[in-house]
Structures are given as C-alpha cells and as structure tokens.
Image: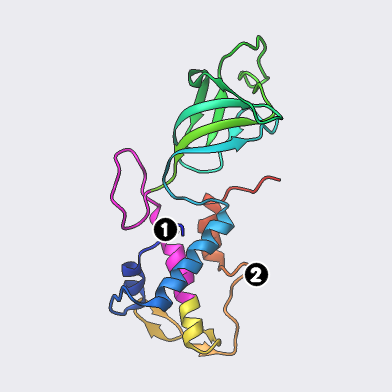
C-alpha cells in the first residue's frame, strides 16, 4: 500500500480528538483521501530511487517523466519493438527536474530540432531515475523534498469531510464545531464535485496534477 499523504497524528489534531493509532475509521479515511488525491493528480508522489520506466516520445522537445520532482537519471536506453534495449550515454541527456522533462543534448544524429535539442533516437526509451517526495512523518533525506504541506492539508480536508459525513449517518455536513472544523448535519448536499473534492481543494491539486497521456 502506498504511504499516506498525511499522518494519523495530524488527522486527530485537525478533528480535535485524541490521537489513537488504532483508529480504523481514521486510517480508512486517510487511505481513501490519499488515493483520491493520487488518482486526481495522476501521480504517486512517493520517493523512489532508481525507478525503471518506459517513456514514449510524443514529438515534444523532451521526454516527459511521469513523477515529480525528478532528481537524477542513472540510465537511459533505446527500446526496440522486440524489447531489446540499447544503452545510451547518460551524459548525452539533460534533466529538468522541476518539470520532469528529459532532453537529449548530443549524440550521433547530426541534426537538431527547432528547439535546439537532438531528436530522441527511438520510439520507446527506457529511463531509470530517482523521484518523489519524503512523506509526512518519514525521516528526511538530504536533497529530497518533503511533500508540500498544502497537499497534506487537502488530504486532511477530504478525509475529515468524509469522516463527518459517515458520523452523521450519510447526511451532509453543514455547521457543527469540531476542533478547527465547523460542521452541521442536514439534508443539503455538501458542495463537492463529481470527483468528491471542493473548489478550494481542486485549486491546490491542480498545481500538482499531471494530465494523463493515452
């Protein structure tokens, strides 16, 4: 199971209840909210060293790596239609870690694209790279970013809303004070979209969303 995008301790704090590591309802709520955020953003966010993937060039100046931030590329290979891989020089590639774009800067091909980068010499490219964030509550690693606090807050907000709705017997939460949250129960539906998030949560998540490619 992927790690949670927020801690049970923080979830207890925002709900104004004592921390209980055996609180199954809280754990399920956080798992669901973390999964929803990952699905919506098309990203796992988890820190992984030397992750091996296959990238399909899409006619853009650089290869698009699916997980951000990207820290280091340790291997690149051209992948033939029969699956045979030909190792390429890592030094012939430049990684823009913030955007997740991997550019080919040199090689045996004598021409350049209009952007100044060499074209990718294969229809499929194998990339081994290190990416992602340290999750809340995990030990820090030098040079690796922690998960942005606003993402954790979005997860906590979604999880708290779902927990309150369950506690109210399925009725919408409208206005009762619980810790830092003011909620109540009634027949009016909560203002969430078809995905299950609010406009404020969507505004945060859109900054980290990567559009899925066919």
Tell me the quarter of the image containing the C terminus.
top right
SS class, disc 1:
loop
- 10 Å crowding of disc 1: few (<14), some (14-19), many (20+): some
Residue range in magenta is 134-161
Q: Are marks 2 and 1 in contact (CB under 8 Å)?
A: no
Q: Is residue 129 left or right of residue 119?
A: left
Mark drawn on residue 194: 2
Above or below, comparing residue 20 to residue 106 in the picture: below
Mark drawn on residue 3: 1
The reply to whether residue 120 is visible in this rendering is yes
Upstream in sequence: badge 2 or badge 1: 1
Magenta-drawn stretch contains 73: no
How many discs appear?
Answer: 2
Q: Position of residue 20 (x, y in %)?
A: 30, 76
Q: Residue, x 67% and y 25% (percent of image)?
A: 122
- Residue 64: quadrant of the picture: top right
Q: Position of residue 35 (x, y in %)?
A: 52, 62
Q: What color scheme is it?
A: rainbow
Above or below, comparing residue 17 to residue 94 in the picture: below
Q: Residue, x 54% and y 26% (percent of image)?
A: 76
- Residue 72: quadrant of the picture: top left
Q: Residue, x 61% and y 30% (percent of image)?
A: 125
């Amino acid at each position: 199971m992927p790690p949670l995008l927020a801690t049970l301790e923080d979830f207890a704090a925002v709900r104004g209840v004592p921390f209980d590591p055996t609180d199954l309802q809280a754990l399920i709520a956080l798992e669901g909210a973390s999964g929803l955020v990952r699905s919506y953003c098309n990203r796992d966010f988890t820190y992984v060293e030397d992750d091996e993937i296959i990238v399909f060039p899409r006619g853009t100046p650089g290869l698009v790596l699916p997980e951000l931030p990207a820290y280091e590329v340790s291997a690149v290979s051209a992948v033939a239609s029969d699956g045979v891989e030909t190792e390429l020089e890592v030094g012939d590639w430049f990684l823009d870690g913030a955007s997740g774009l991997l550019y080919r800067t040199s090689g045996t091909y004598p021409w350049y694209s209009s952007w100044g980068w060499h074209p990718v010499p294969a229809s499929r490219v194998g990339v081994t790279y290190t990416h992602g964030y340290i999750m809340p509550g995990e030990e820090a690693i030098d040079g690796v970013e922690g998960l942005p606090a606003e993402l954790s807050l979005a997860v906590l907000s979604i999880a708290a809303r779902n927990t309150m709705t369950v506690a109210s017997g399925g009725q919408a939460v409208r206005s009762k004070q619980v810790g830092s949250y003011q909620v109540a129960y009634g027949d009016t539906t909560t203002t969430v979209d078809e995905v299950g998030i609010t406009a404020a949560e969507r505004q945060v998540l859109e900054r980290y969303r990567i559009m899925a490619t066919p």
